[in-house]
């Protein structure tokens, strides 16, 4: 069992938990995720790692209530426990594996939308720990849905906050802030990392392509099973079929077919849609084993 030592509500339907998982905490890196399961009958839920404390053996997760399983998770308190807490899974952020001097020579812009602030935070924190100042744009629909602002402010070189309704920070979408920084303030970036809702990442990538800024996105929003066997996170990247959970979750955003991914994501929510996708995609429907015939 994996004990929950801290549980708090960050915003409406958004929760944070610190979980005792020493082996995961010891090995995890920014960009990776875990799969949690409340009990034997519980659903497997993939969640991107928000933070980790190797000395205390703690891993921080942030999740949003989107269905029955996450609703159950939200009812858990400090002292409760998960039956399973598996990880780290997926591929770590590319910069973690690169020569640190090369990474230091780049100018990074991180864009976090909504719950995407959670996976952005460990990446920006890693940058700060390695002496690299980066710019961060954090966006939310309204002030009440903004999360981890102070945590991001503590590790970012510059933090720009924007809300769709103008209730806090700047008014408008994150793309408007990118335009302002690049065009009006003359800032130059070598890499943009954008994590948030699929539609947000799509329009960020559309803009950064015009601006000539290479962009990395995380496709964790479309993961279901987390092992490549359910076929839910199948996506086309540069004309090739990839699976977010085993090949990612991070990809070159300029090569991702967002329209296909979002359409597929909607279809996968119904049994009829899943049956249609299985029939249409045949043996390539699944990742991992490719022929498991499993269901989400």
Image (cartoon, grey):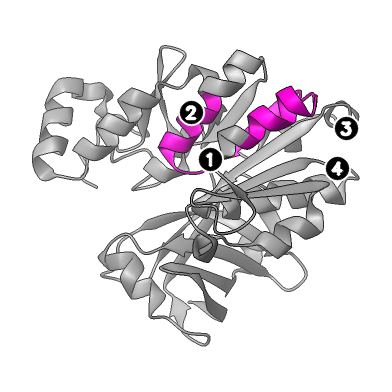
Closer to the camera in the image, 266 or 94: 266
Please identify, in this view, whether the residue under mark 2 or under mark 1 is nearer the observer.
Answer: 1
Q: Earlier in the sequence, mark 4 or mark 3?
A: 3
Q: Element type at marker 3?
A: helix
Q: Measure the alpha-carbon separation of dots 4 and 1.
A: 23 Å
Q: Element type at marker 1?
A: loop
Q: Element type at marker 2?
A: helix
Q: Is residue 191 magenta?
A: yes
For the residues bearing labels 2 and 1, Cβ distance under 8 angstroms: yes
Residue found at the very far left of the displayed protein: 272
Residue that numbered label 3 is attached to: 104
Place of residue 94 in the rendered image (x, y in percent of width and height, measured from the top left): 68, 32
Residue found at the very far top of the displayed protein: 239
Q: Earlier in the sequence, mark 1 or mark 3?
A: 3
Q: Measure the alpha-carbon separation of dots 2 and 4.
A: 25 Å
Q: Measure the alpha-carbon separation of dots 2 and 3.
A: 27 Å
Q: Which residues are magenta?
A: 177-205
Residue at horizontal 58%, vertical 55%?
118
161 left or right of 230 in image: right
Q: Quadrant of residue 183?
A: top right
Q: Element type at marker 4?
A: loop
Residue that numbered label 2 is attached to: 203
Q: Measure the alpha-carbon separation of dots 4 and 3.
A: 9 Å
126 left or right of 81 in image: right
Q: Measure the alpha-carbon separation of dots 1 and 3.
A: 29 Å
Please identify, in this view, whether the residue under mark 4 or under mark 3 is nearer the observer.
Answer: 4
The answer to whether residue 253 shows anywhere in this view is no
Q: Which mark is residue 133?
A: 4
């Amino acid at each position: 069992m994996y004990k929950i030592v801290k549980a708090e509500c960050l915003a409406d339907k958004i929760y944070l938990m610190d979980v005792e998982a020493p082996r995961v905490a010891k090995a995890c890196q920014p960009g990776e995720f875990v799969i949690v399961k409340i009990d034997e009958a519980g659903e497997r839920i993939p969640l991107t790692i928000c933070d980790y404390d190797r000395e205390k053996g703690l891993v921080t997760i942030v999740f949003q209530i989107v269905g029955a399983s996450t609703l159950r998770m939200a009812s858990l308190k400090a002292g409760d426990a998960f039956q399973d807490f598996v990880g780290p899974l997926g591929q770590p952020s590319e910069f973690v594996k690169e020569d640190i001097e090369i990474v230091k020579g780049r100018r990074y812009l991180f864009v976090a939308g909504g719950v995407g602030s959670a996976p952005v935070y460990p990446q920006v924190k890693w940058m700060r720990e390695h002496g690299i100042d980066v710019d961060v744009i954090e966006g939310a629909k309204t002030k009440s849905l903004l999360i981890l602002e102070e945590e991001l402010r503590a590790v970012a070189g510059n933090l720009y906050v924007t809300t769709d309704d103008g209730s806090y920070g700047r008014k408008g979408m994150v793309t408007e802030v990118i335009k302002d920084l690049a065009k009006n303030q003359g800032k130059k970036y070598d890499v943009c990392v954008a994590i948030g809702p699929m539609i947000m990442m799509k329009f960020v990538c559309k803009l950064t392509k015009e601006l000539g800024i290479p962009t990395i996105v995380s496709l964790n929003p479309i993961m279901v099973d987390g092992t490549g066997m359910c076929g839910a996170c199948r996506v086309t990247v540069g004309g090739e079929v990839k699976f977010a959970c085993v090949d990612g979750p991070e990809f070159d955003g300029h090569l991702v077919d967002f329209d296909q991914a979002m359409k597929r994501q909607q279809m996968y929510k119904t049994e009829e849609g899943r049956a249609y996708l299985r029939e249409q995609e045949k043996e390539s429907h699944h990742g991992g084993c490719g022929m498991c015939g499993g269901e989400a």
